[in-house]
Amino acid sequence: MAKINVLDQITIDKIAAGEVVERPASIVKELVENAIDAGATTITVEITDGGISSIRVIDDGEGIAEEDIRKAFLRHSTSKISDAGDLTTIATLGFRGEALSSIAAISMVRLTTKTHDRDYGSLYEINGGSEASLSQVGAPNGTTFEIQQIFYNTPARRKFLKTPITEASHISDLLTRLSLSHPEISFQFINNNQVKLHTTGSGDLKDVIYHLYGREVASNIRAVTFTGKNLQVTGYVGNPSINRGNRNFENFFVGGRYIKSNLISKAIEDAYKEYTMQHRYPFACLLLSCDPELVDVNVHPTKMEVRFANTQQVYEDVYEAVHQTLKIEEHIPQVEAPLPVKTTAENSGESVLNAAPTITREAPPAKEERDLEYYLEEMKRRVSAYHEKTQVAPPIPEREEGVAPSWSMPEVIREKPEVNEQLNLFQEKFIQPKAASTYQFIGQLFETYWLIQYQESLYIIDQHAAHEKVLYEKTLKEMRNRDYTTQMISPPIVLNLSMKEAQLLQENLDSFLKIGFEIEAFGPDSYKVSGVPGNLFSVGKKDLLLEMLDELSEEFNRRTTTSLIDEKIASISCKAAVKGNMQFNEKEMRELIDELLKLDNPYHCPHGRPTIIAMTKREIEKKFKRIV
């Protein structure tokens, strides 16, 4: 039998470091979070070779007092909590006191720090967990950590690190999320002497989103402000058109801490369910705040996961926050005309526009962002020439200094009201009762799409998606207002369930019986289904029951058993919707359009496909080069 040994402190620290320090990004995370807790307003992270060779983190926070430096590198030493009672009210990002001792155990650390009340700073060096020196030096307020040769004394760990570019990308992702959670702090990220990220620290979250994700995303997001029973939710969510095939666009923070949570992801995605296709994930940057006693952050070594006291209520609060925000505006995708590279007036004698002389422009600048002055001058010259000949068209208004050109995204907020009126699709809503009496029906295209003119826009409706949506909502409404009846079936369906499935069915048995199912025990973990709701028609009854049990097995769900069954049946009824390549007369089309316009959410079919797209008069005129 092997003898039991008491490990020395160095070995203990190296083992503990395996939980805290997985890769260079883990070190950056711990040091930057300490800087945030210290009240820093600017944080700079410099790395070489993906952080494998060196990491430097500089902040202007409170600094560490000289007498506390040695204690800071001991295991479980921290300034964030003092006893076990503080664990229930944690308001800081760090609290365990393991980070510095773990980092020092597997690397060479050089610490320079100065508090605001001292005239001098301190320099401390510790290599592989062993102190090398402590001295006084001149230093600015704040703290600078220099980490060299990560895992130099644990080569088995070092060989499992990825390439420098991969490790650098992990650090970049980390700093991206930290800058979103703390827009009031200026973050700078330097990789191999190249600045990769630099935020202003203005406190404006939308400004950070613009800087990180670009204009297309920033111009298609909307603010979220919601106060629920347990949570206060703020931040931004994207329009349904801004989505990806993975969850990289989903960022959520609890108490300023980035977390991964299936609960919150499901709440967000369920709120978008009616607006996006399956397996497409939305953009979301949500900051959640709640009573610290209602959330446990001490459940994961890297604090990437949290546990909520009431998961169902958290789910409902996040769902409502996102769902209410999405309901505010119309979600009709707008077709845009691409920017013409070269514009030359055609010679035709029939068009009013051809009264202007033919103008061939000089080659535009090669750079991607074309010079604004060049375009303004070109526009002035074209307008002047046009008016000298025709005096017909109104002048094109000049733009103010710094206003983006006309080919920008249509929902970008602008200072000039004229431009905003031209491009804002939502000023006069097509989806409202008064539109039904004023829109002009043009006709049917390809026996699948309907063309409608309303004010300054052309709307194109997919007849199959529109009919699906109308049928779904109509069936759902009828089922919610009906009296439940039972249709007996022979032979009965026998369900052989797992222990968990049997428990779920037993817990929800009253709900199943109430809506028309006849279910009774039929041996250990088996149930006999001898009757189903009359509205199930010829639907696959066994498969439907198993699907509903699967959904009920989720830890959190916004629907009751009754509404879950109703939605399943309503979704199946969509198969009766008209298909493409079917002709309609104008009366039938108008009736269906009128029903569509009365729905709360007519923009997408039950499967997330759009029912309506739009193209503004302005975009059509740009296509024909009537305007530039």
Image (cartoon, rainbow, N blue to C red):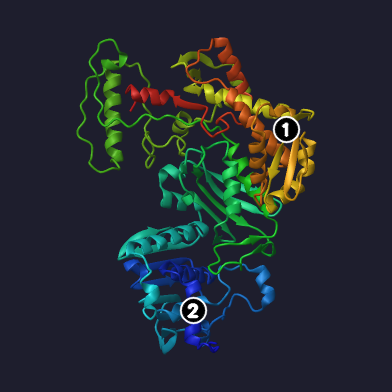
Under mark 1, the amino acid is: Pro
Closer to the chain start, of discs 2 and 1, is 2
Q: CA distance from mark 2 to mark 1?
A: 62 Å
- Location of residue 162 with respect to 353 vertically, above or below: below
Q: Position of residue 550 (x, y in %)?
A: 64, 45
Identify which amino acid the numbered label 2 is placed on: Ile
* Residue 39, image x, y percentages: 53, 69
Q: Which residue is mark 1?
A: 491
Q: Give the number of callouts.
A: 2
Left or right: 613 in relation to 364? right
Kindly identify the residue that appears in the image at 35 percent across and 73 percent down.
54
Where is residue 335? Give x, y as percent. 42, 29
Under circle 1, the secondary element is strand
Q: Residue 515's image quarter?
A: top right
Question: Around disc 2, counting alpha carbons within 10 Å, would you say few (fewer than 14), some (14 to 19), or many (20 or more)?
Answer: some
Which part of the image, by quadrant, shows the N terminus? bottom right
In terms of secondary structure, where does tag 2 sit?
helix
For label 1, the crowd category at 10 Å Cα-Cα, with few meaning under 14, some 14 to 19 and many 20 or more, is few
Work out whether 506 lies above or below 170: above
- 299 relative to 572, above or below: below
Residue tagged 2: 15
The residue depicted at 42 percent of the width and 71 percent of the height is 58
